[in-house]
Amino acid sequence: MNTNTAYVHGYSSQETRRLGDQADTLATLLHAGTAYPVGSRVLEVGCGVGAQTVHLVRNSPGARIVAVDRSEESLAQARAHLATQEPGAEVTWRTADLFHLPFPARSFDHVFACFVLEHLPAPGRALAALRRVLRPGGTLTVIEGDHGSVLFHPDSHRAHEVIGHQVRLQAAAGGNALLGRQLQPLLRGAGFGDVVIRPRTVYADRTRPSMVEGFTRKTFIAMVESVRDDALGAGLTTAADWDRGIADLRLTADGDGTFHYTFFKAVAVNPGP
Ligand SMILES: C[S@@+](CC[C@H](N)C(=O)[O-])C[C@H]1O[C@@H](n2cnc3c(N)ncnc32)[C@H](O)[C@@H]1O
């Protein structure tokens, strides 16, 4: 199977900004409980522009972190981002495909992957590849979204339609925007044990203006908006319907609008051979 498929959100400067906004807004929610011991060997796969790496480094200052992505351009940005945000931190950056990691078996005590599996055509095979480099007793932490968890007010069929187009485009690129709900069976299927899933809910309304701005507008709506050209190009919708759907989605971040989304955070253990 071809595992080298397109990344649905692309590598534009807008996407770099969106990943940064997303990681910073959600850092407490998503990274709570993730701190690795001093000296432990930690692998982050699909680190992208380093948006999560910064938070890993902050929460695990003494860990030996290796961060991998298949995009050299993203890694260059990640290096620069970390140098600005955490100047003293030492991270080893490697360009690599997570399906063919250039490390011997059992090289790491812990592996971390955030928003990566949902873009892969073979997430189960990816998990098996990650288990190979994890020592017995080591942990894997995976964080994924699930667009089926979206609830909002005012509700709008047209807004749900545009989110559905994003889900369809991600599927066409080989990914799965509804992956969060499948983490438990995927991890068990890849041979992991002690799988614990903790849903992490984001809720935004006018009493939480930083969530409205950082999550509803700059993370979620920005993500859906970014696939406009692809949705039109694929003939999924018309420009008028798309723009009406986005306008309705924006209402969820205005006035009395509310927005809910659930991420799924999994921690699992490699039981060994
Ligand atoms: C949505 S981004 C997430 C980046 C980062 N984890 C974050 O949360 O900000 C997905 C990243 O996975 C990387 N990726 C996708 N497939 C990969 C593969 N087979 N091997 C390594 N990296 C991959 C992409 O290049 C991209 O940087």
Image (cartoon, rainbow, N blue to C red):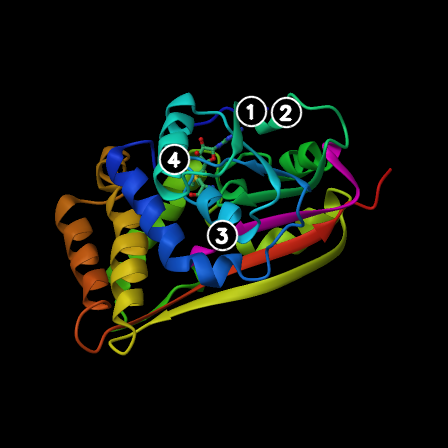
Residue type of the residue flagged with mark 2: Leu
The circle on residue 97 is 1
Query: In the rendered structure, which amino acid carries the disc numbered 3?
Result: Leu
Q: Position of residue 98 (x, y in %)?
A: 59, 29
Q: Residue at x 22, y 38 (%)?
A: 232
**Element marked by disc 4:** helix
Mark 4 Cα-neighbour bin, 10 Å: few <14, some 14–19, many ≥20: some
Point out the frontmost of discs 3 and 4.
4
Amino acid type at mark 1: Asp
Of the image marks 2 and 4, the number of the one nearer the N terminus: 4
**241 over 10 or under it: above or below:** below
Which contiguous range is marked in magenta? 132-147
Give the SS element for disc 3: loop
Residue on which disc 4 sits? 83
Q: Which label lies toward us, 3 or 1?
A: 1
Question: Where is residue 208, by image quadrant?
Answer: bottom left
Residue drawn at (42%, 22%) of the image: 72
Q: Which residue is mark 2?
A: 101
Q: Position of residue 92 (x, y in %)?
A: 54, 29
Q: Would you call the spot at circle 3 few (<14 residues within 10 Å), some (14-19), or many (20 or more)?
A: some
Name the residue carrying label 3: 178
Q: Is residue 244 magenta?
A: no
Badges 1 and 4: C-beta atoms under 8 Å apart?
no
Look at 59% across and 34% down and name the residue there. 122
Q: Nearer the viewer, mark 2 or mark 4?
A: 4
Q: Nearer the viewer, mark 3 or mark 2?
A: 2
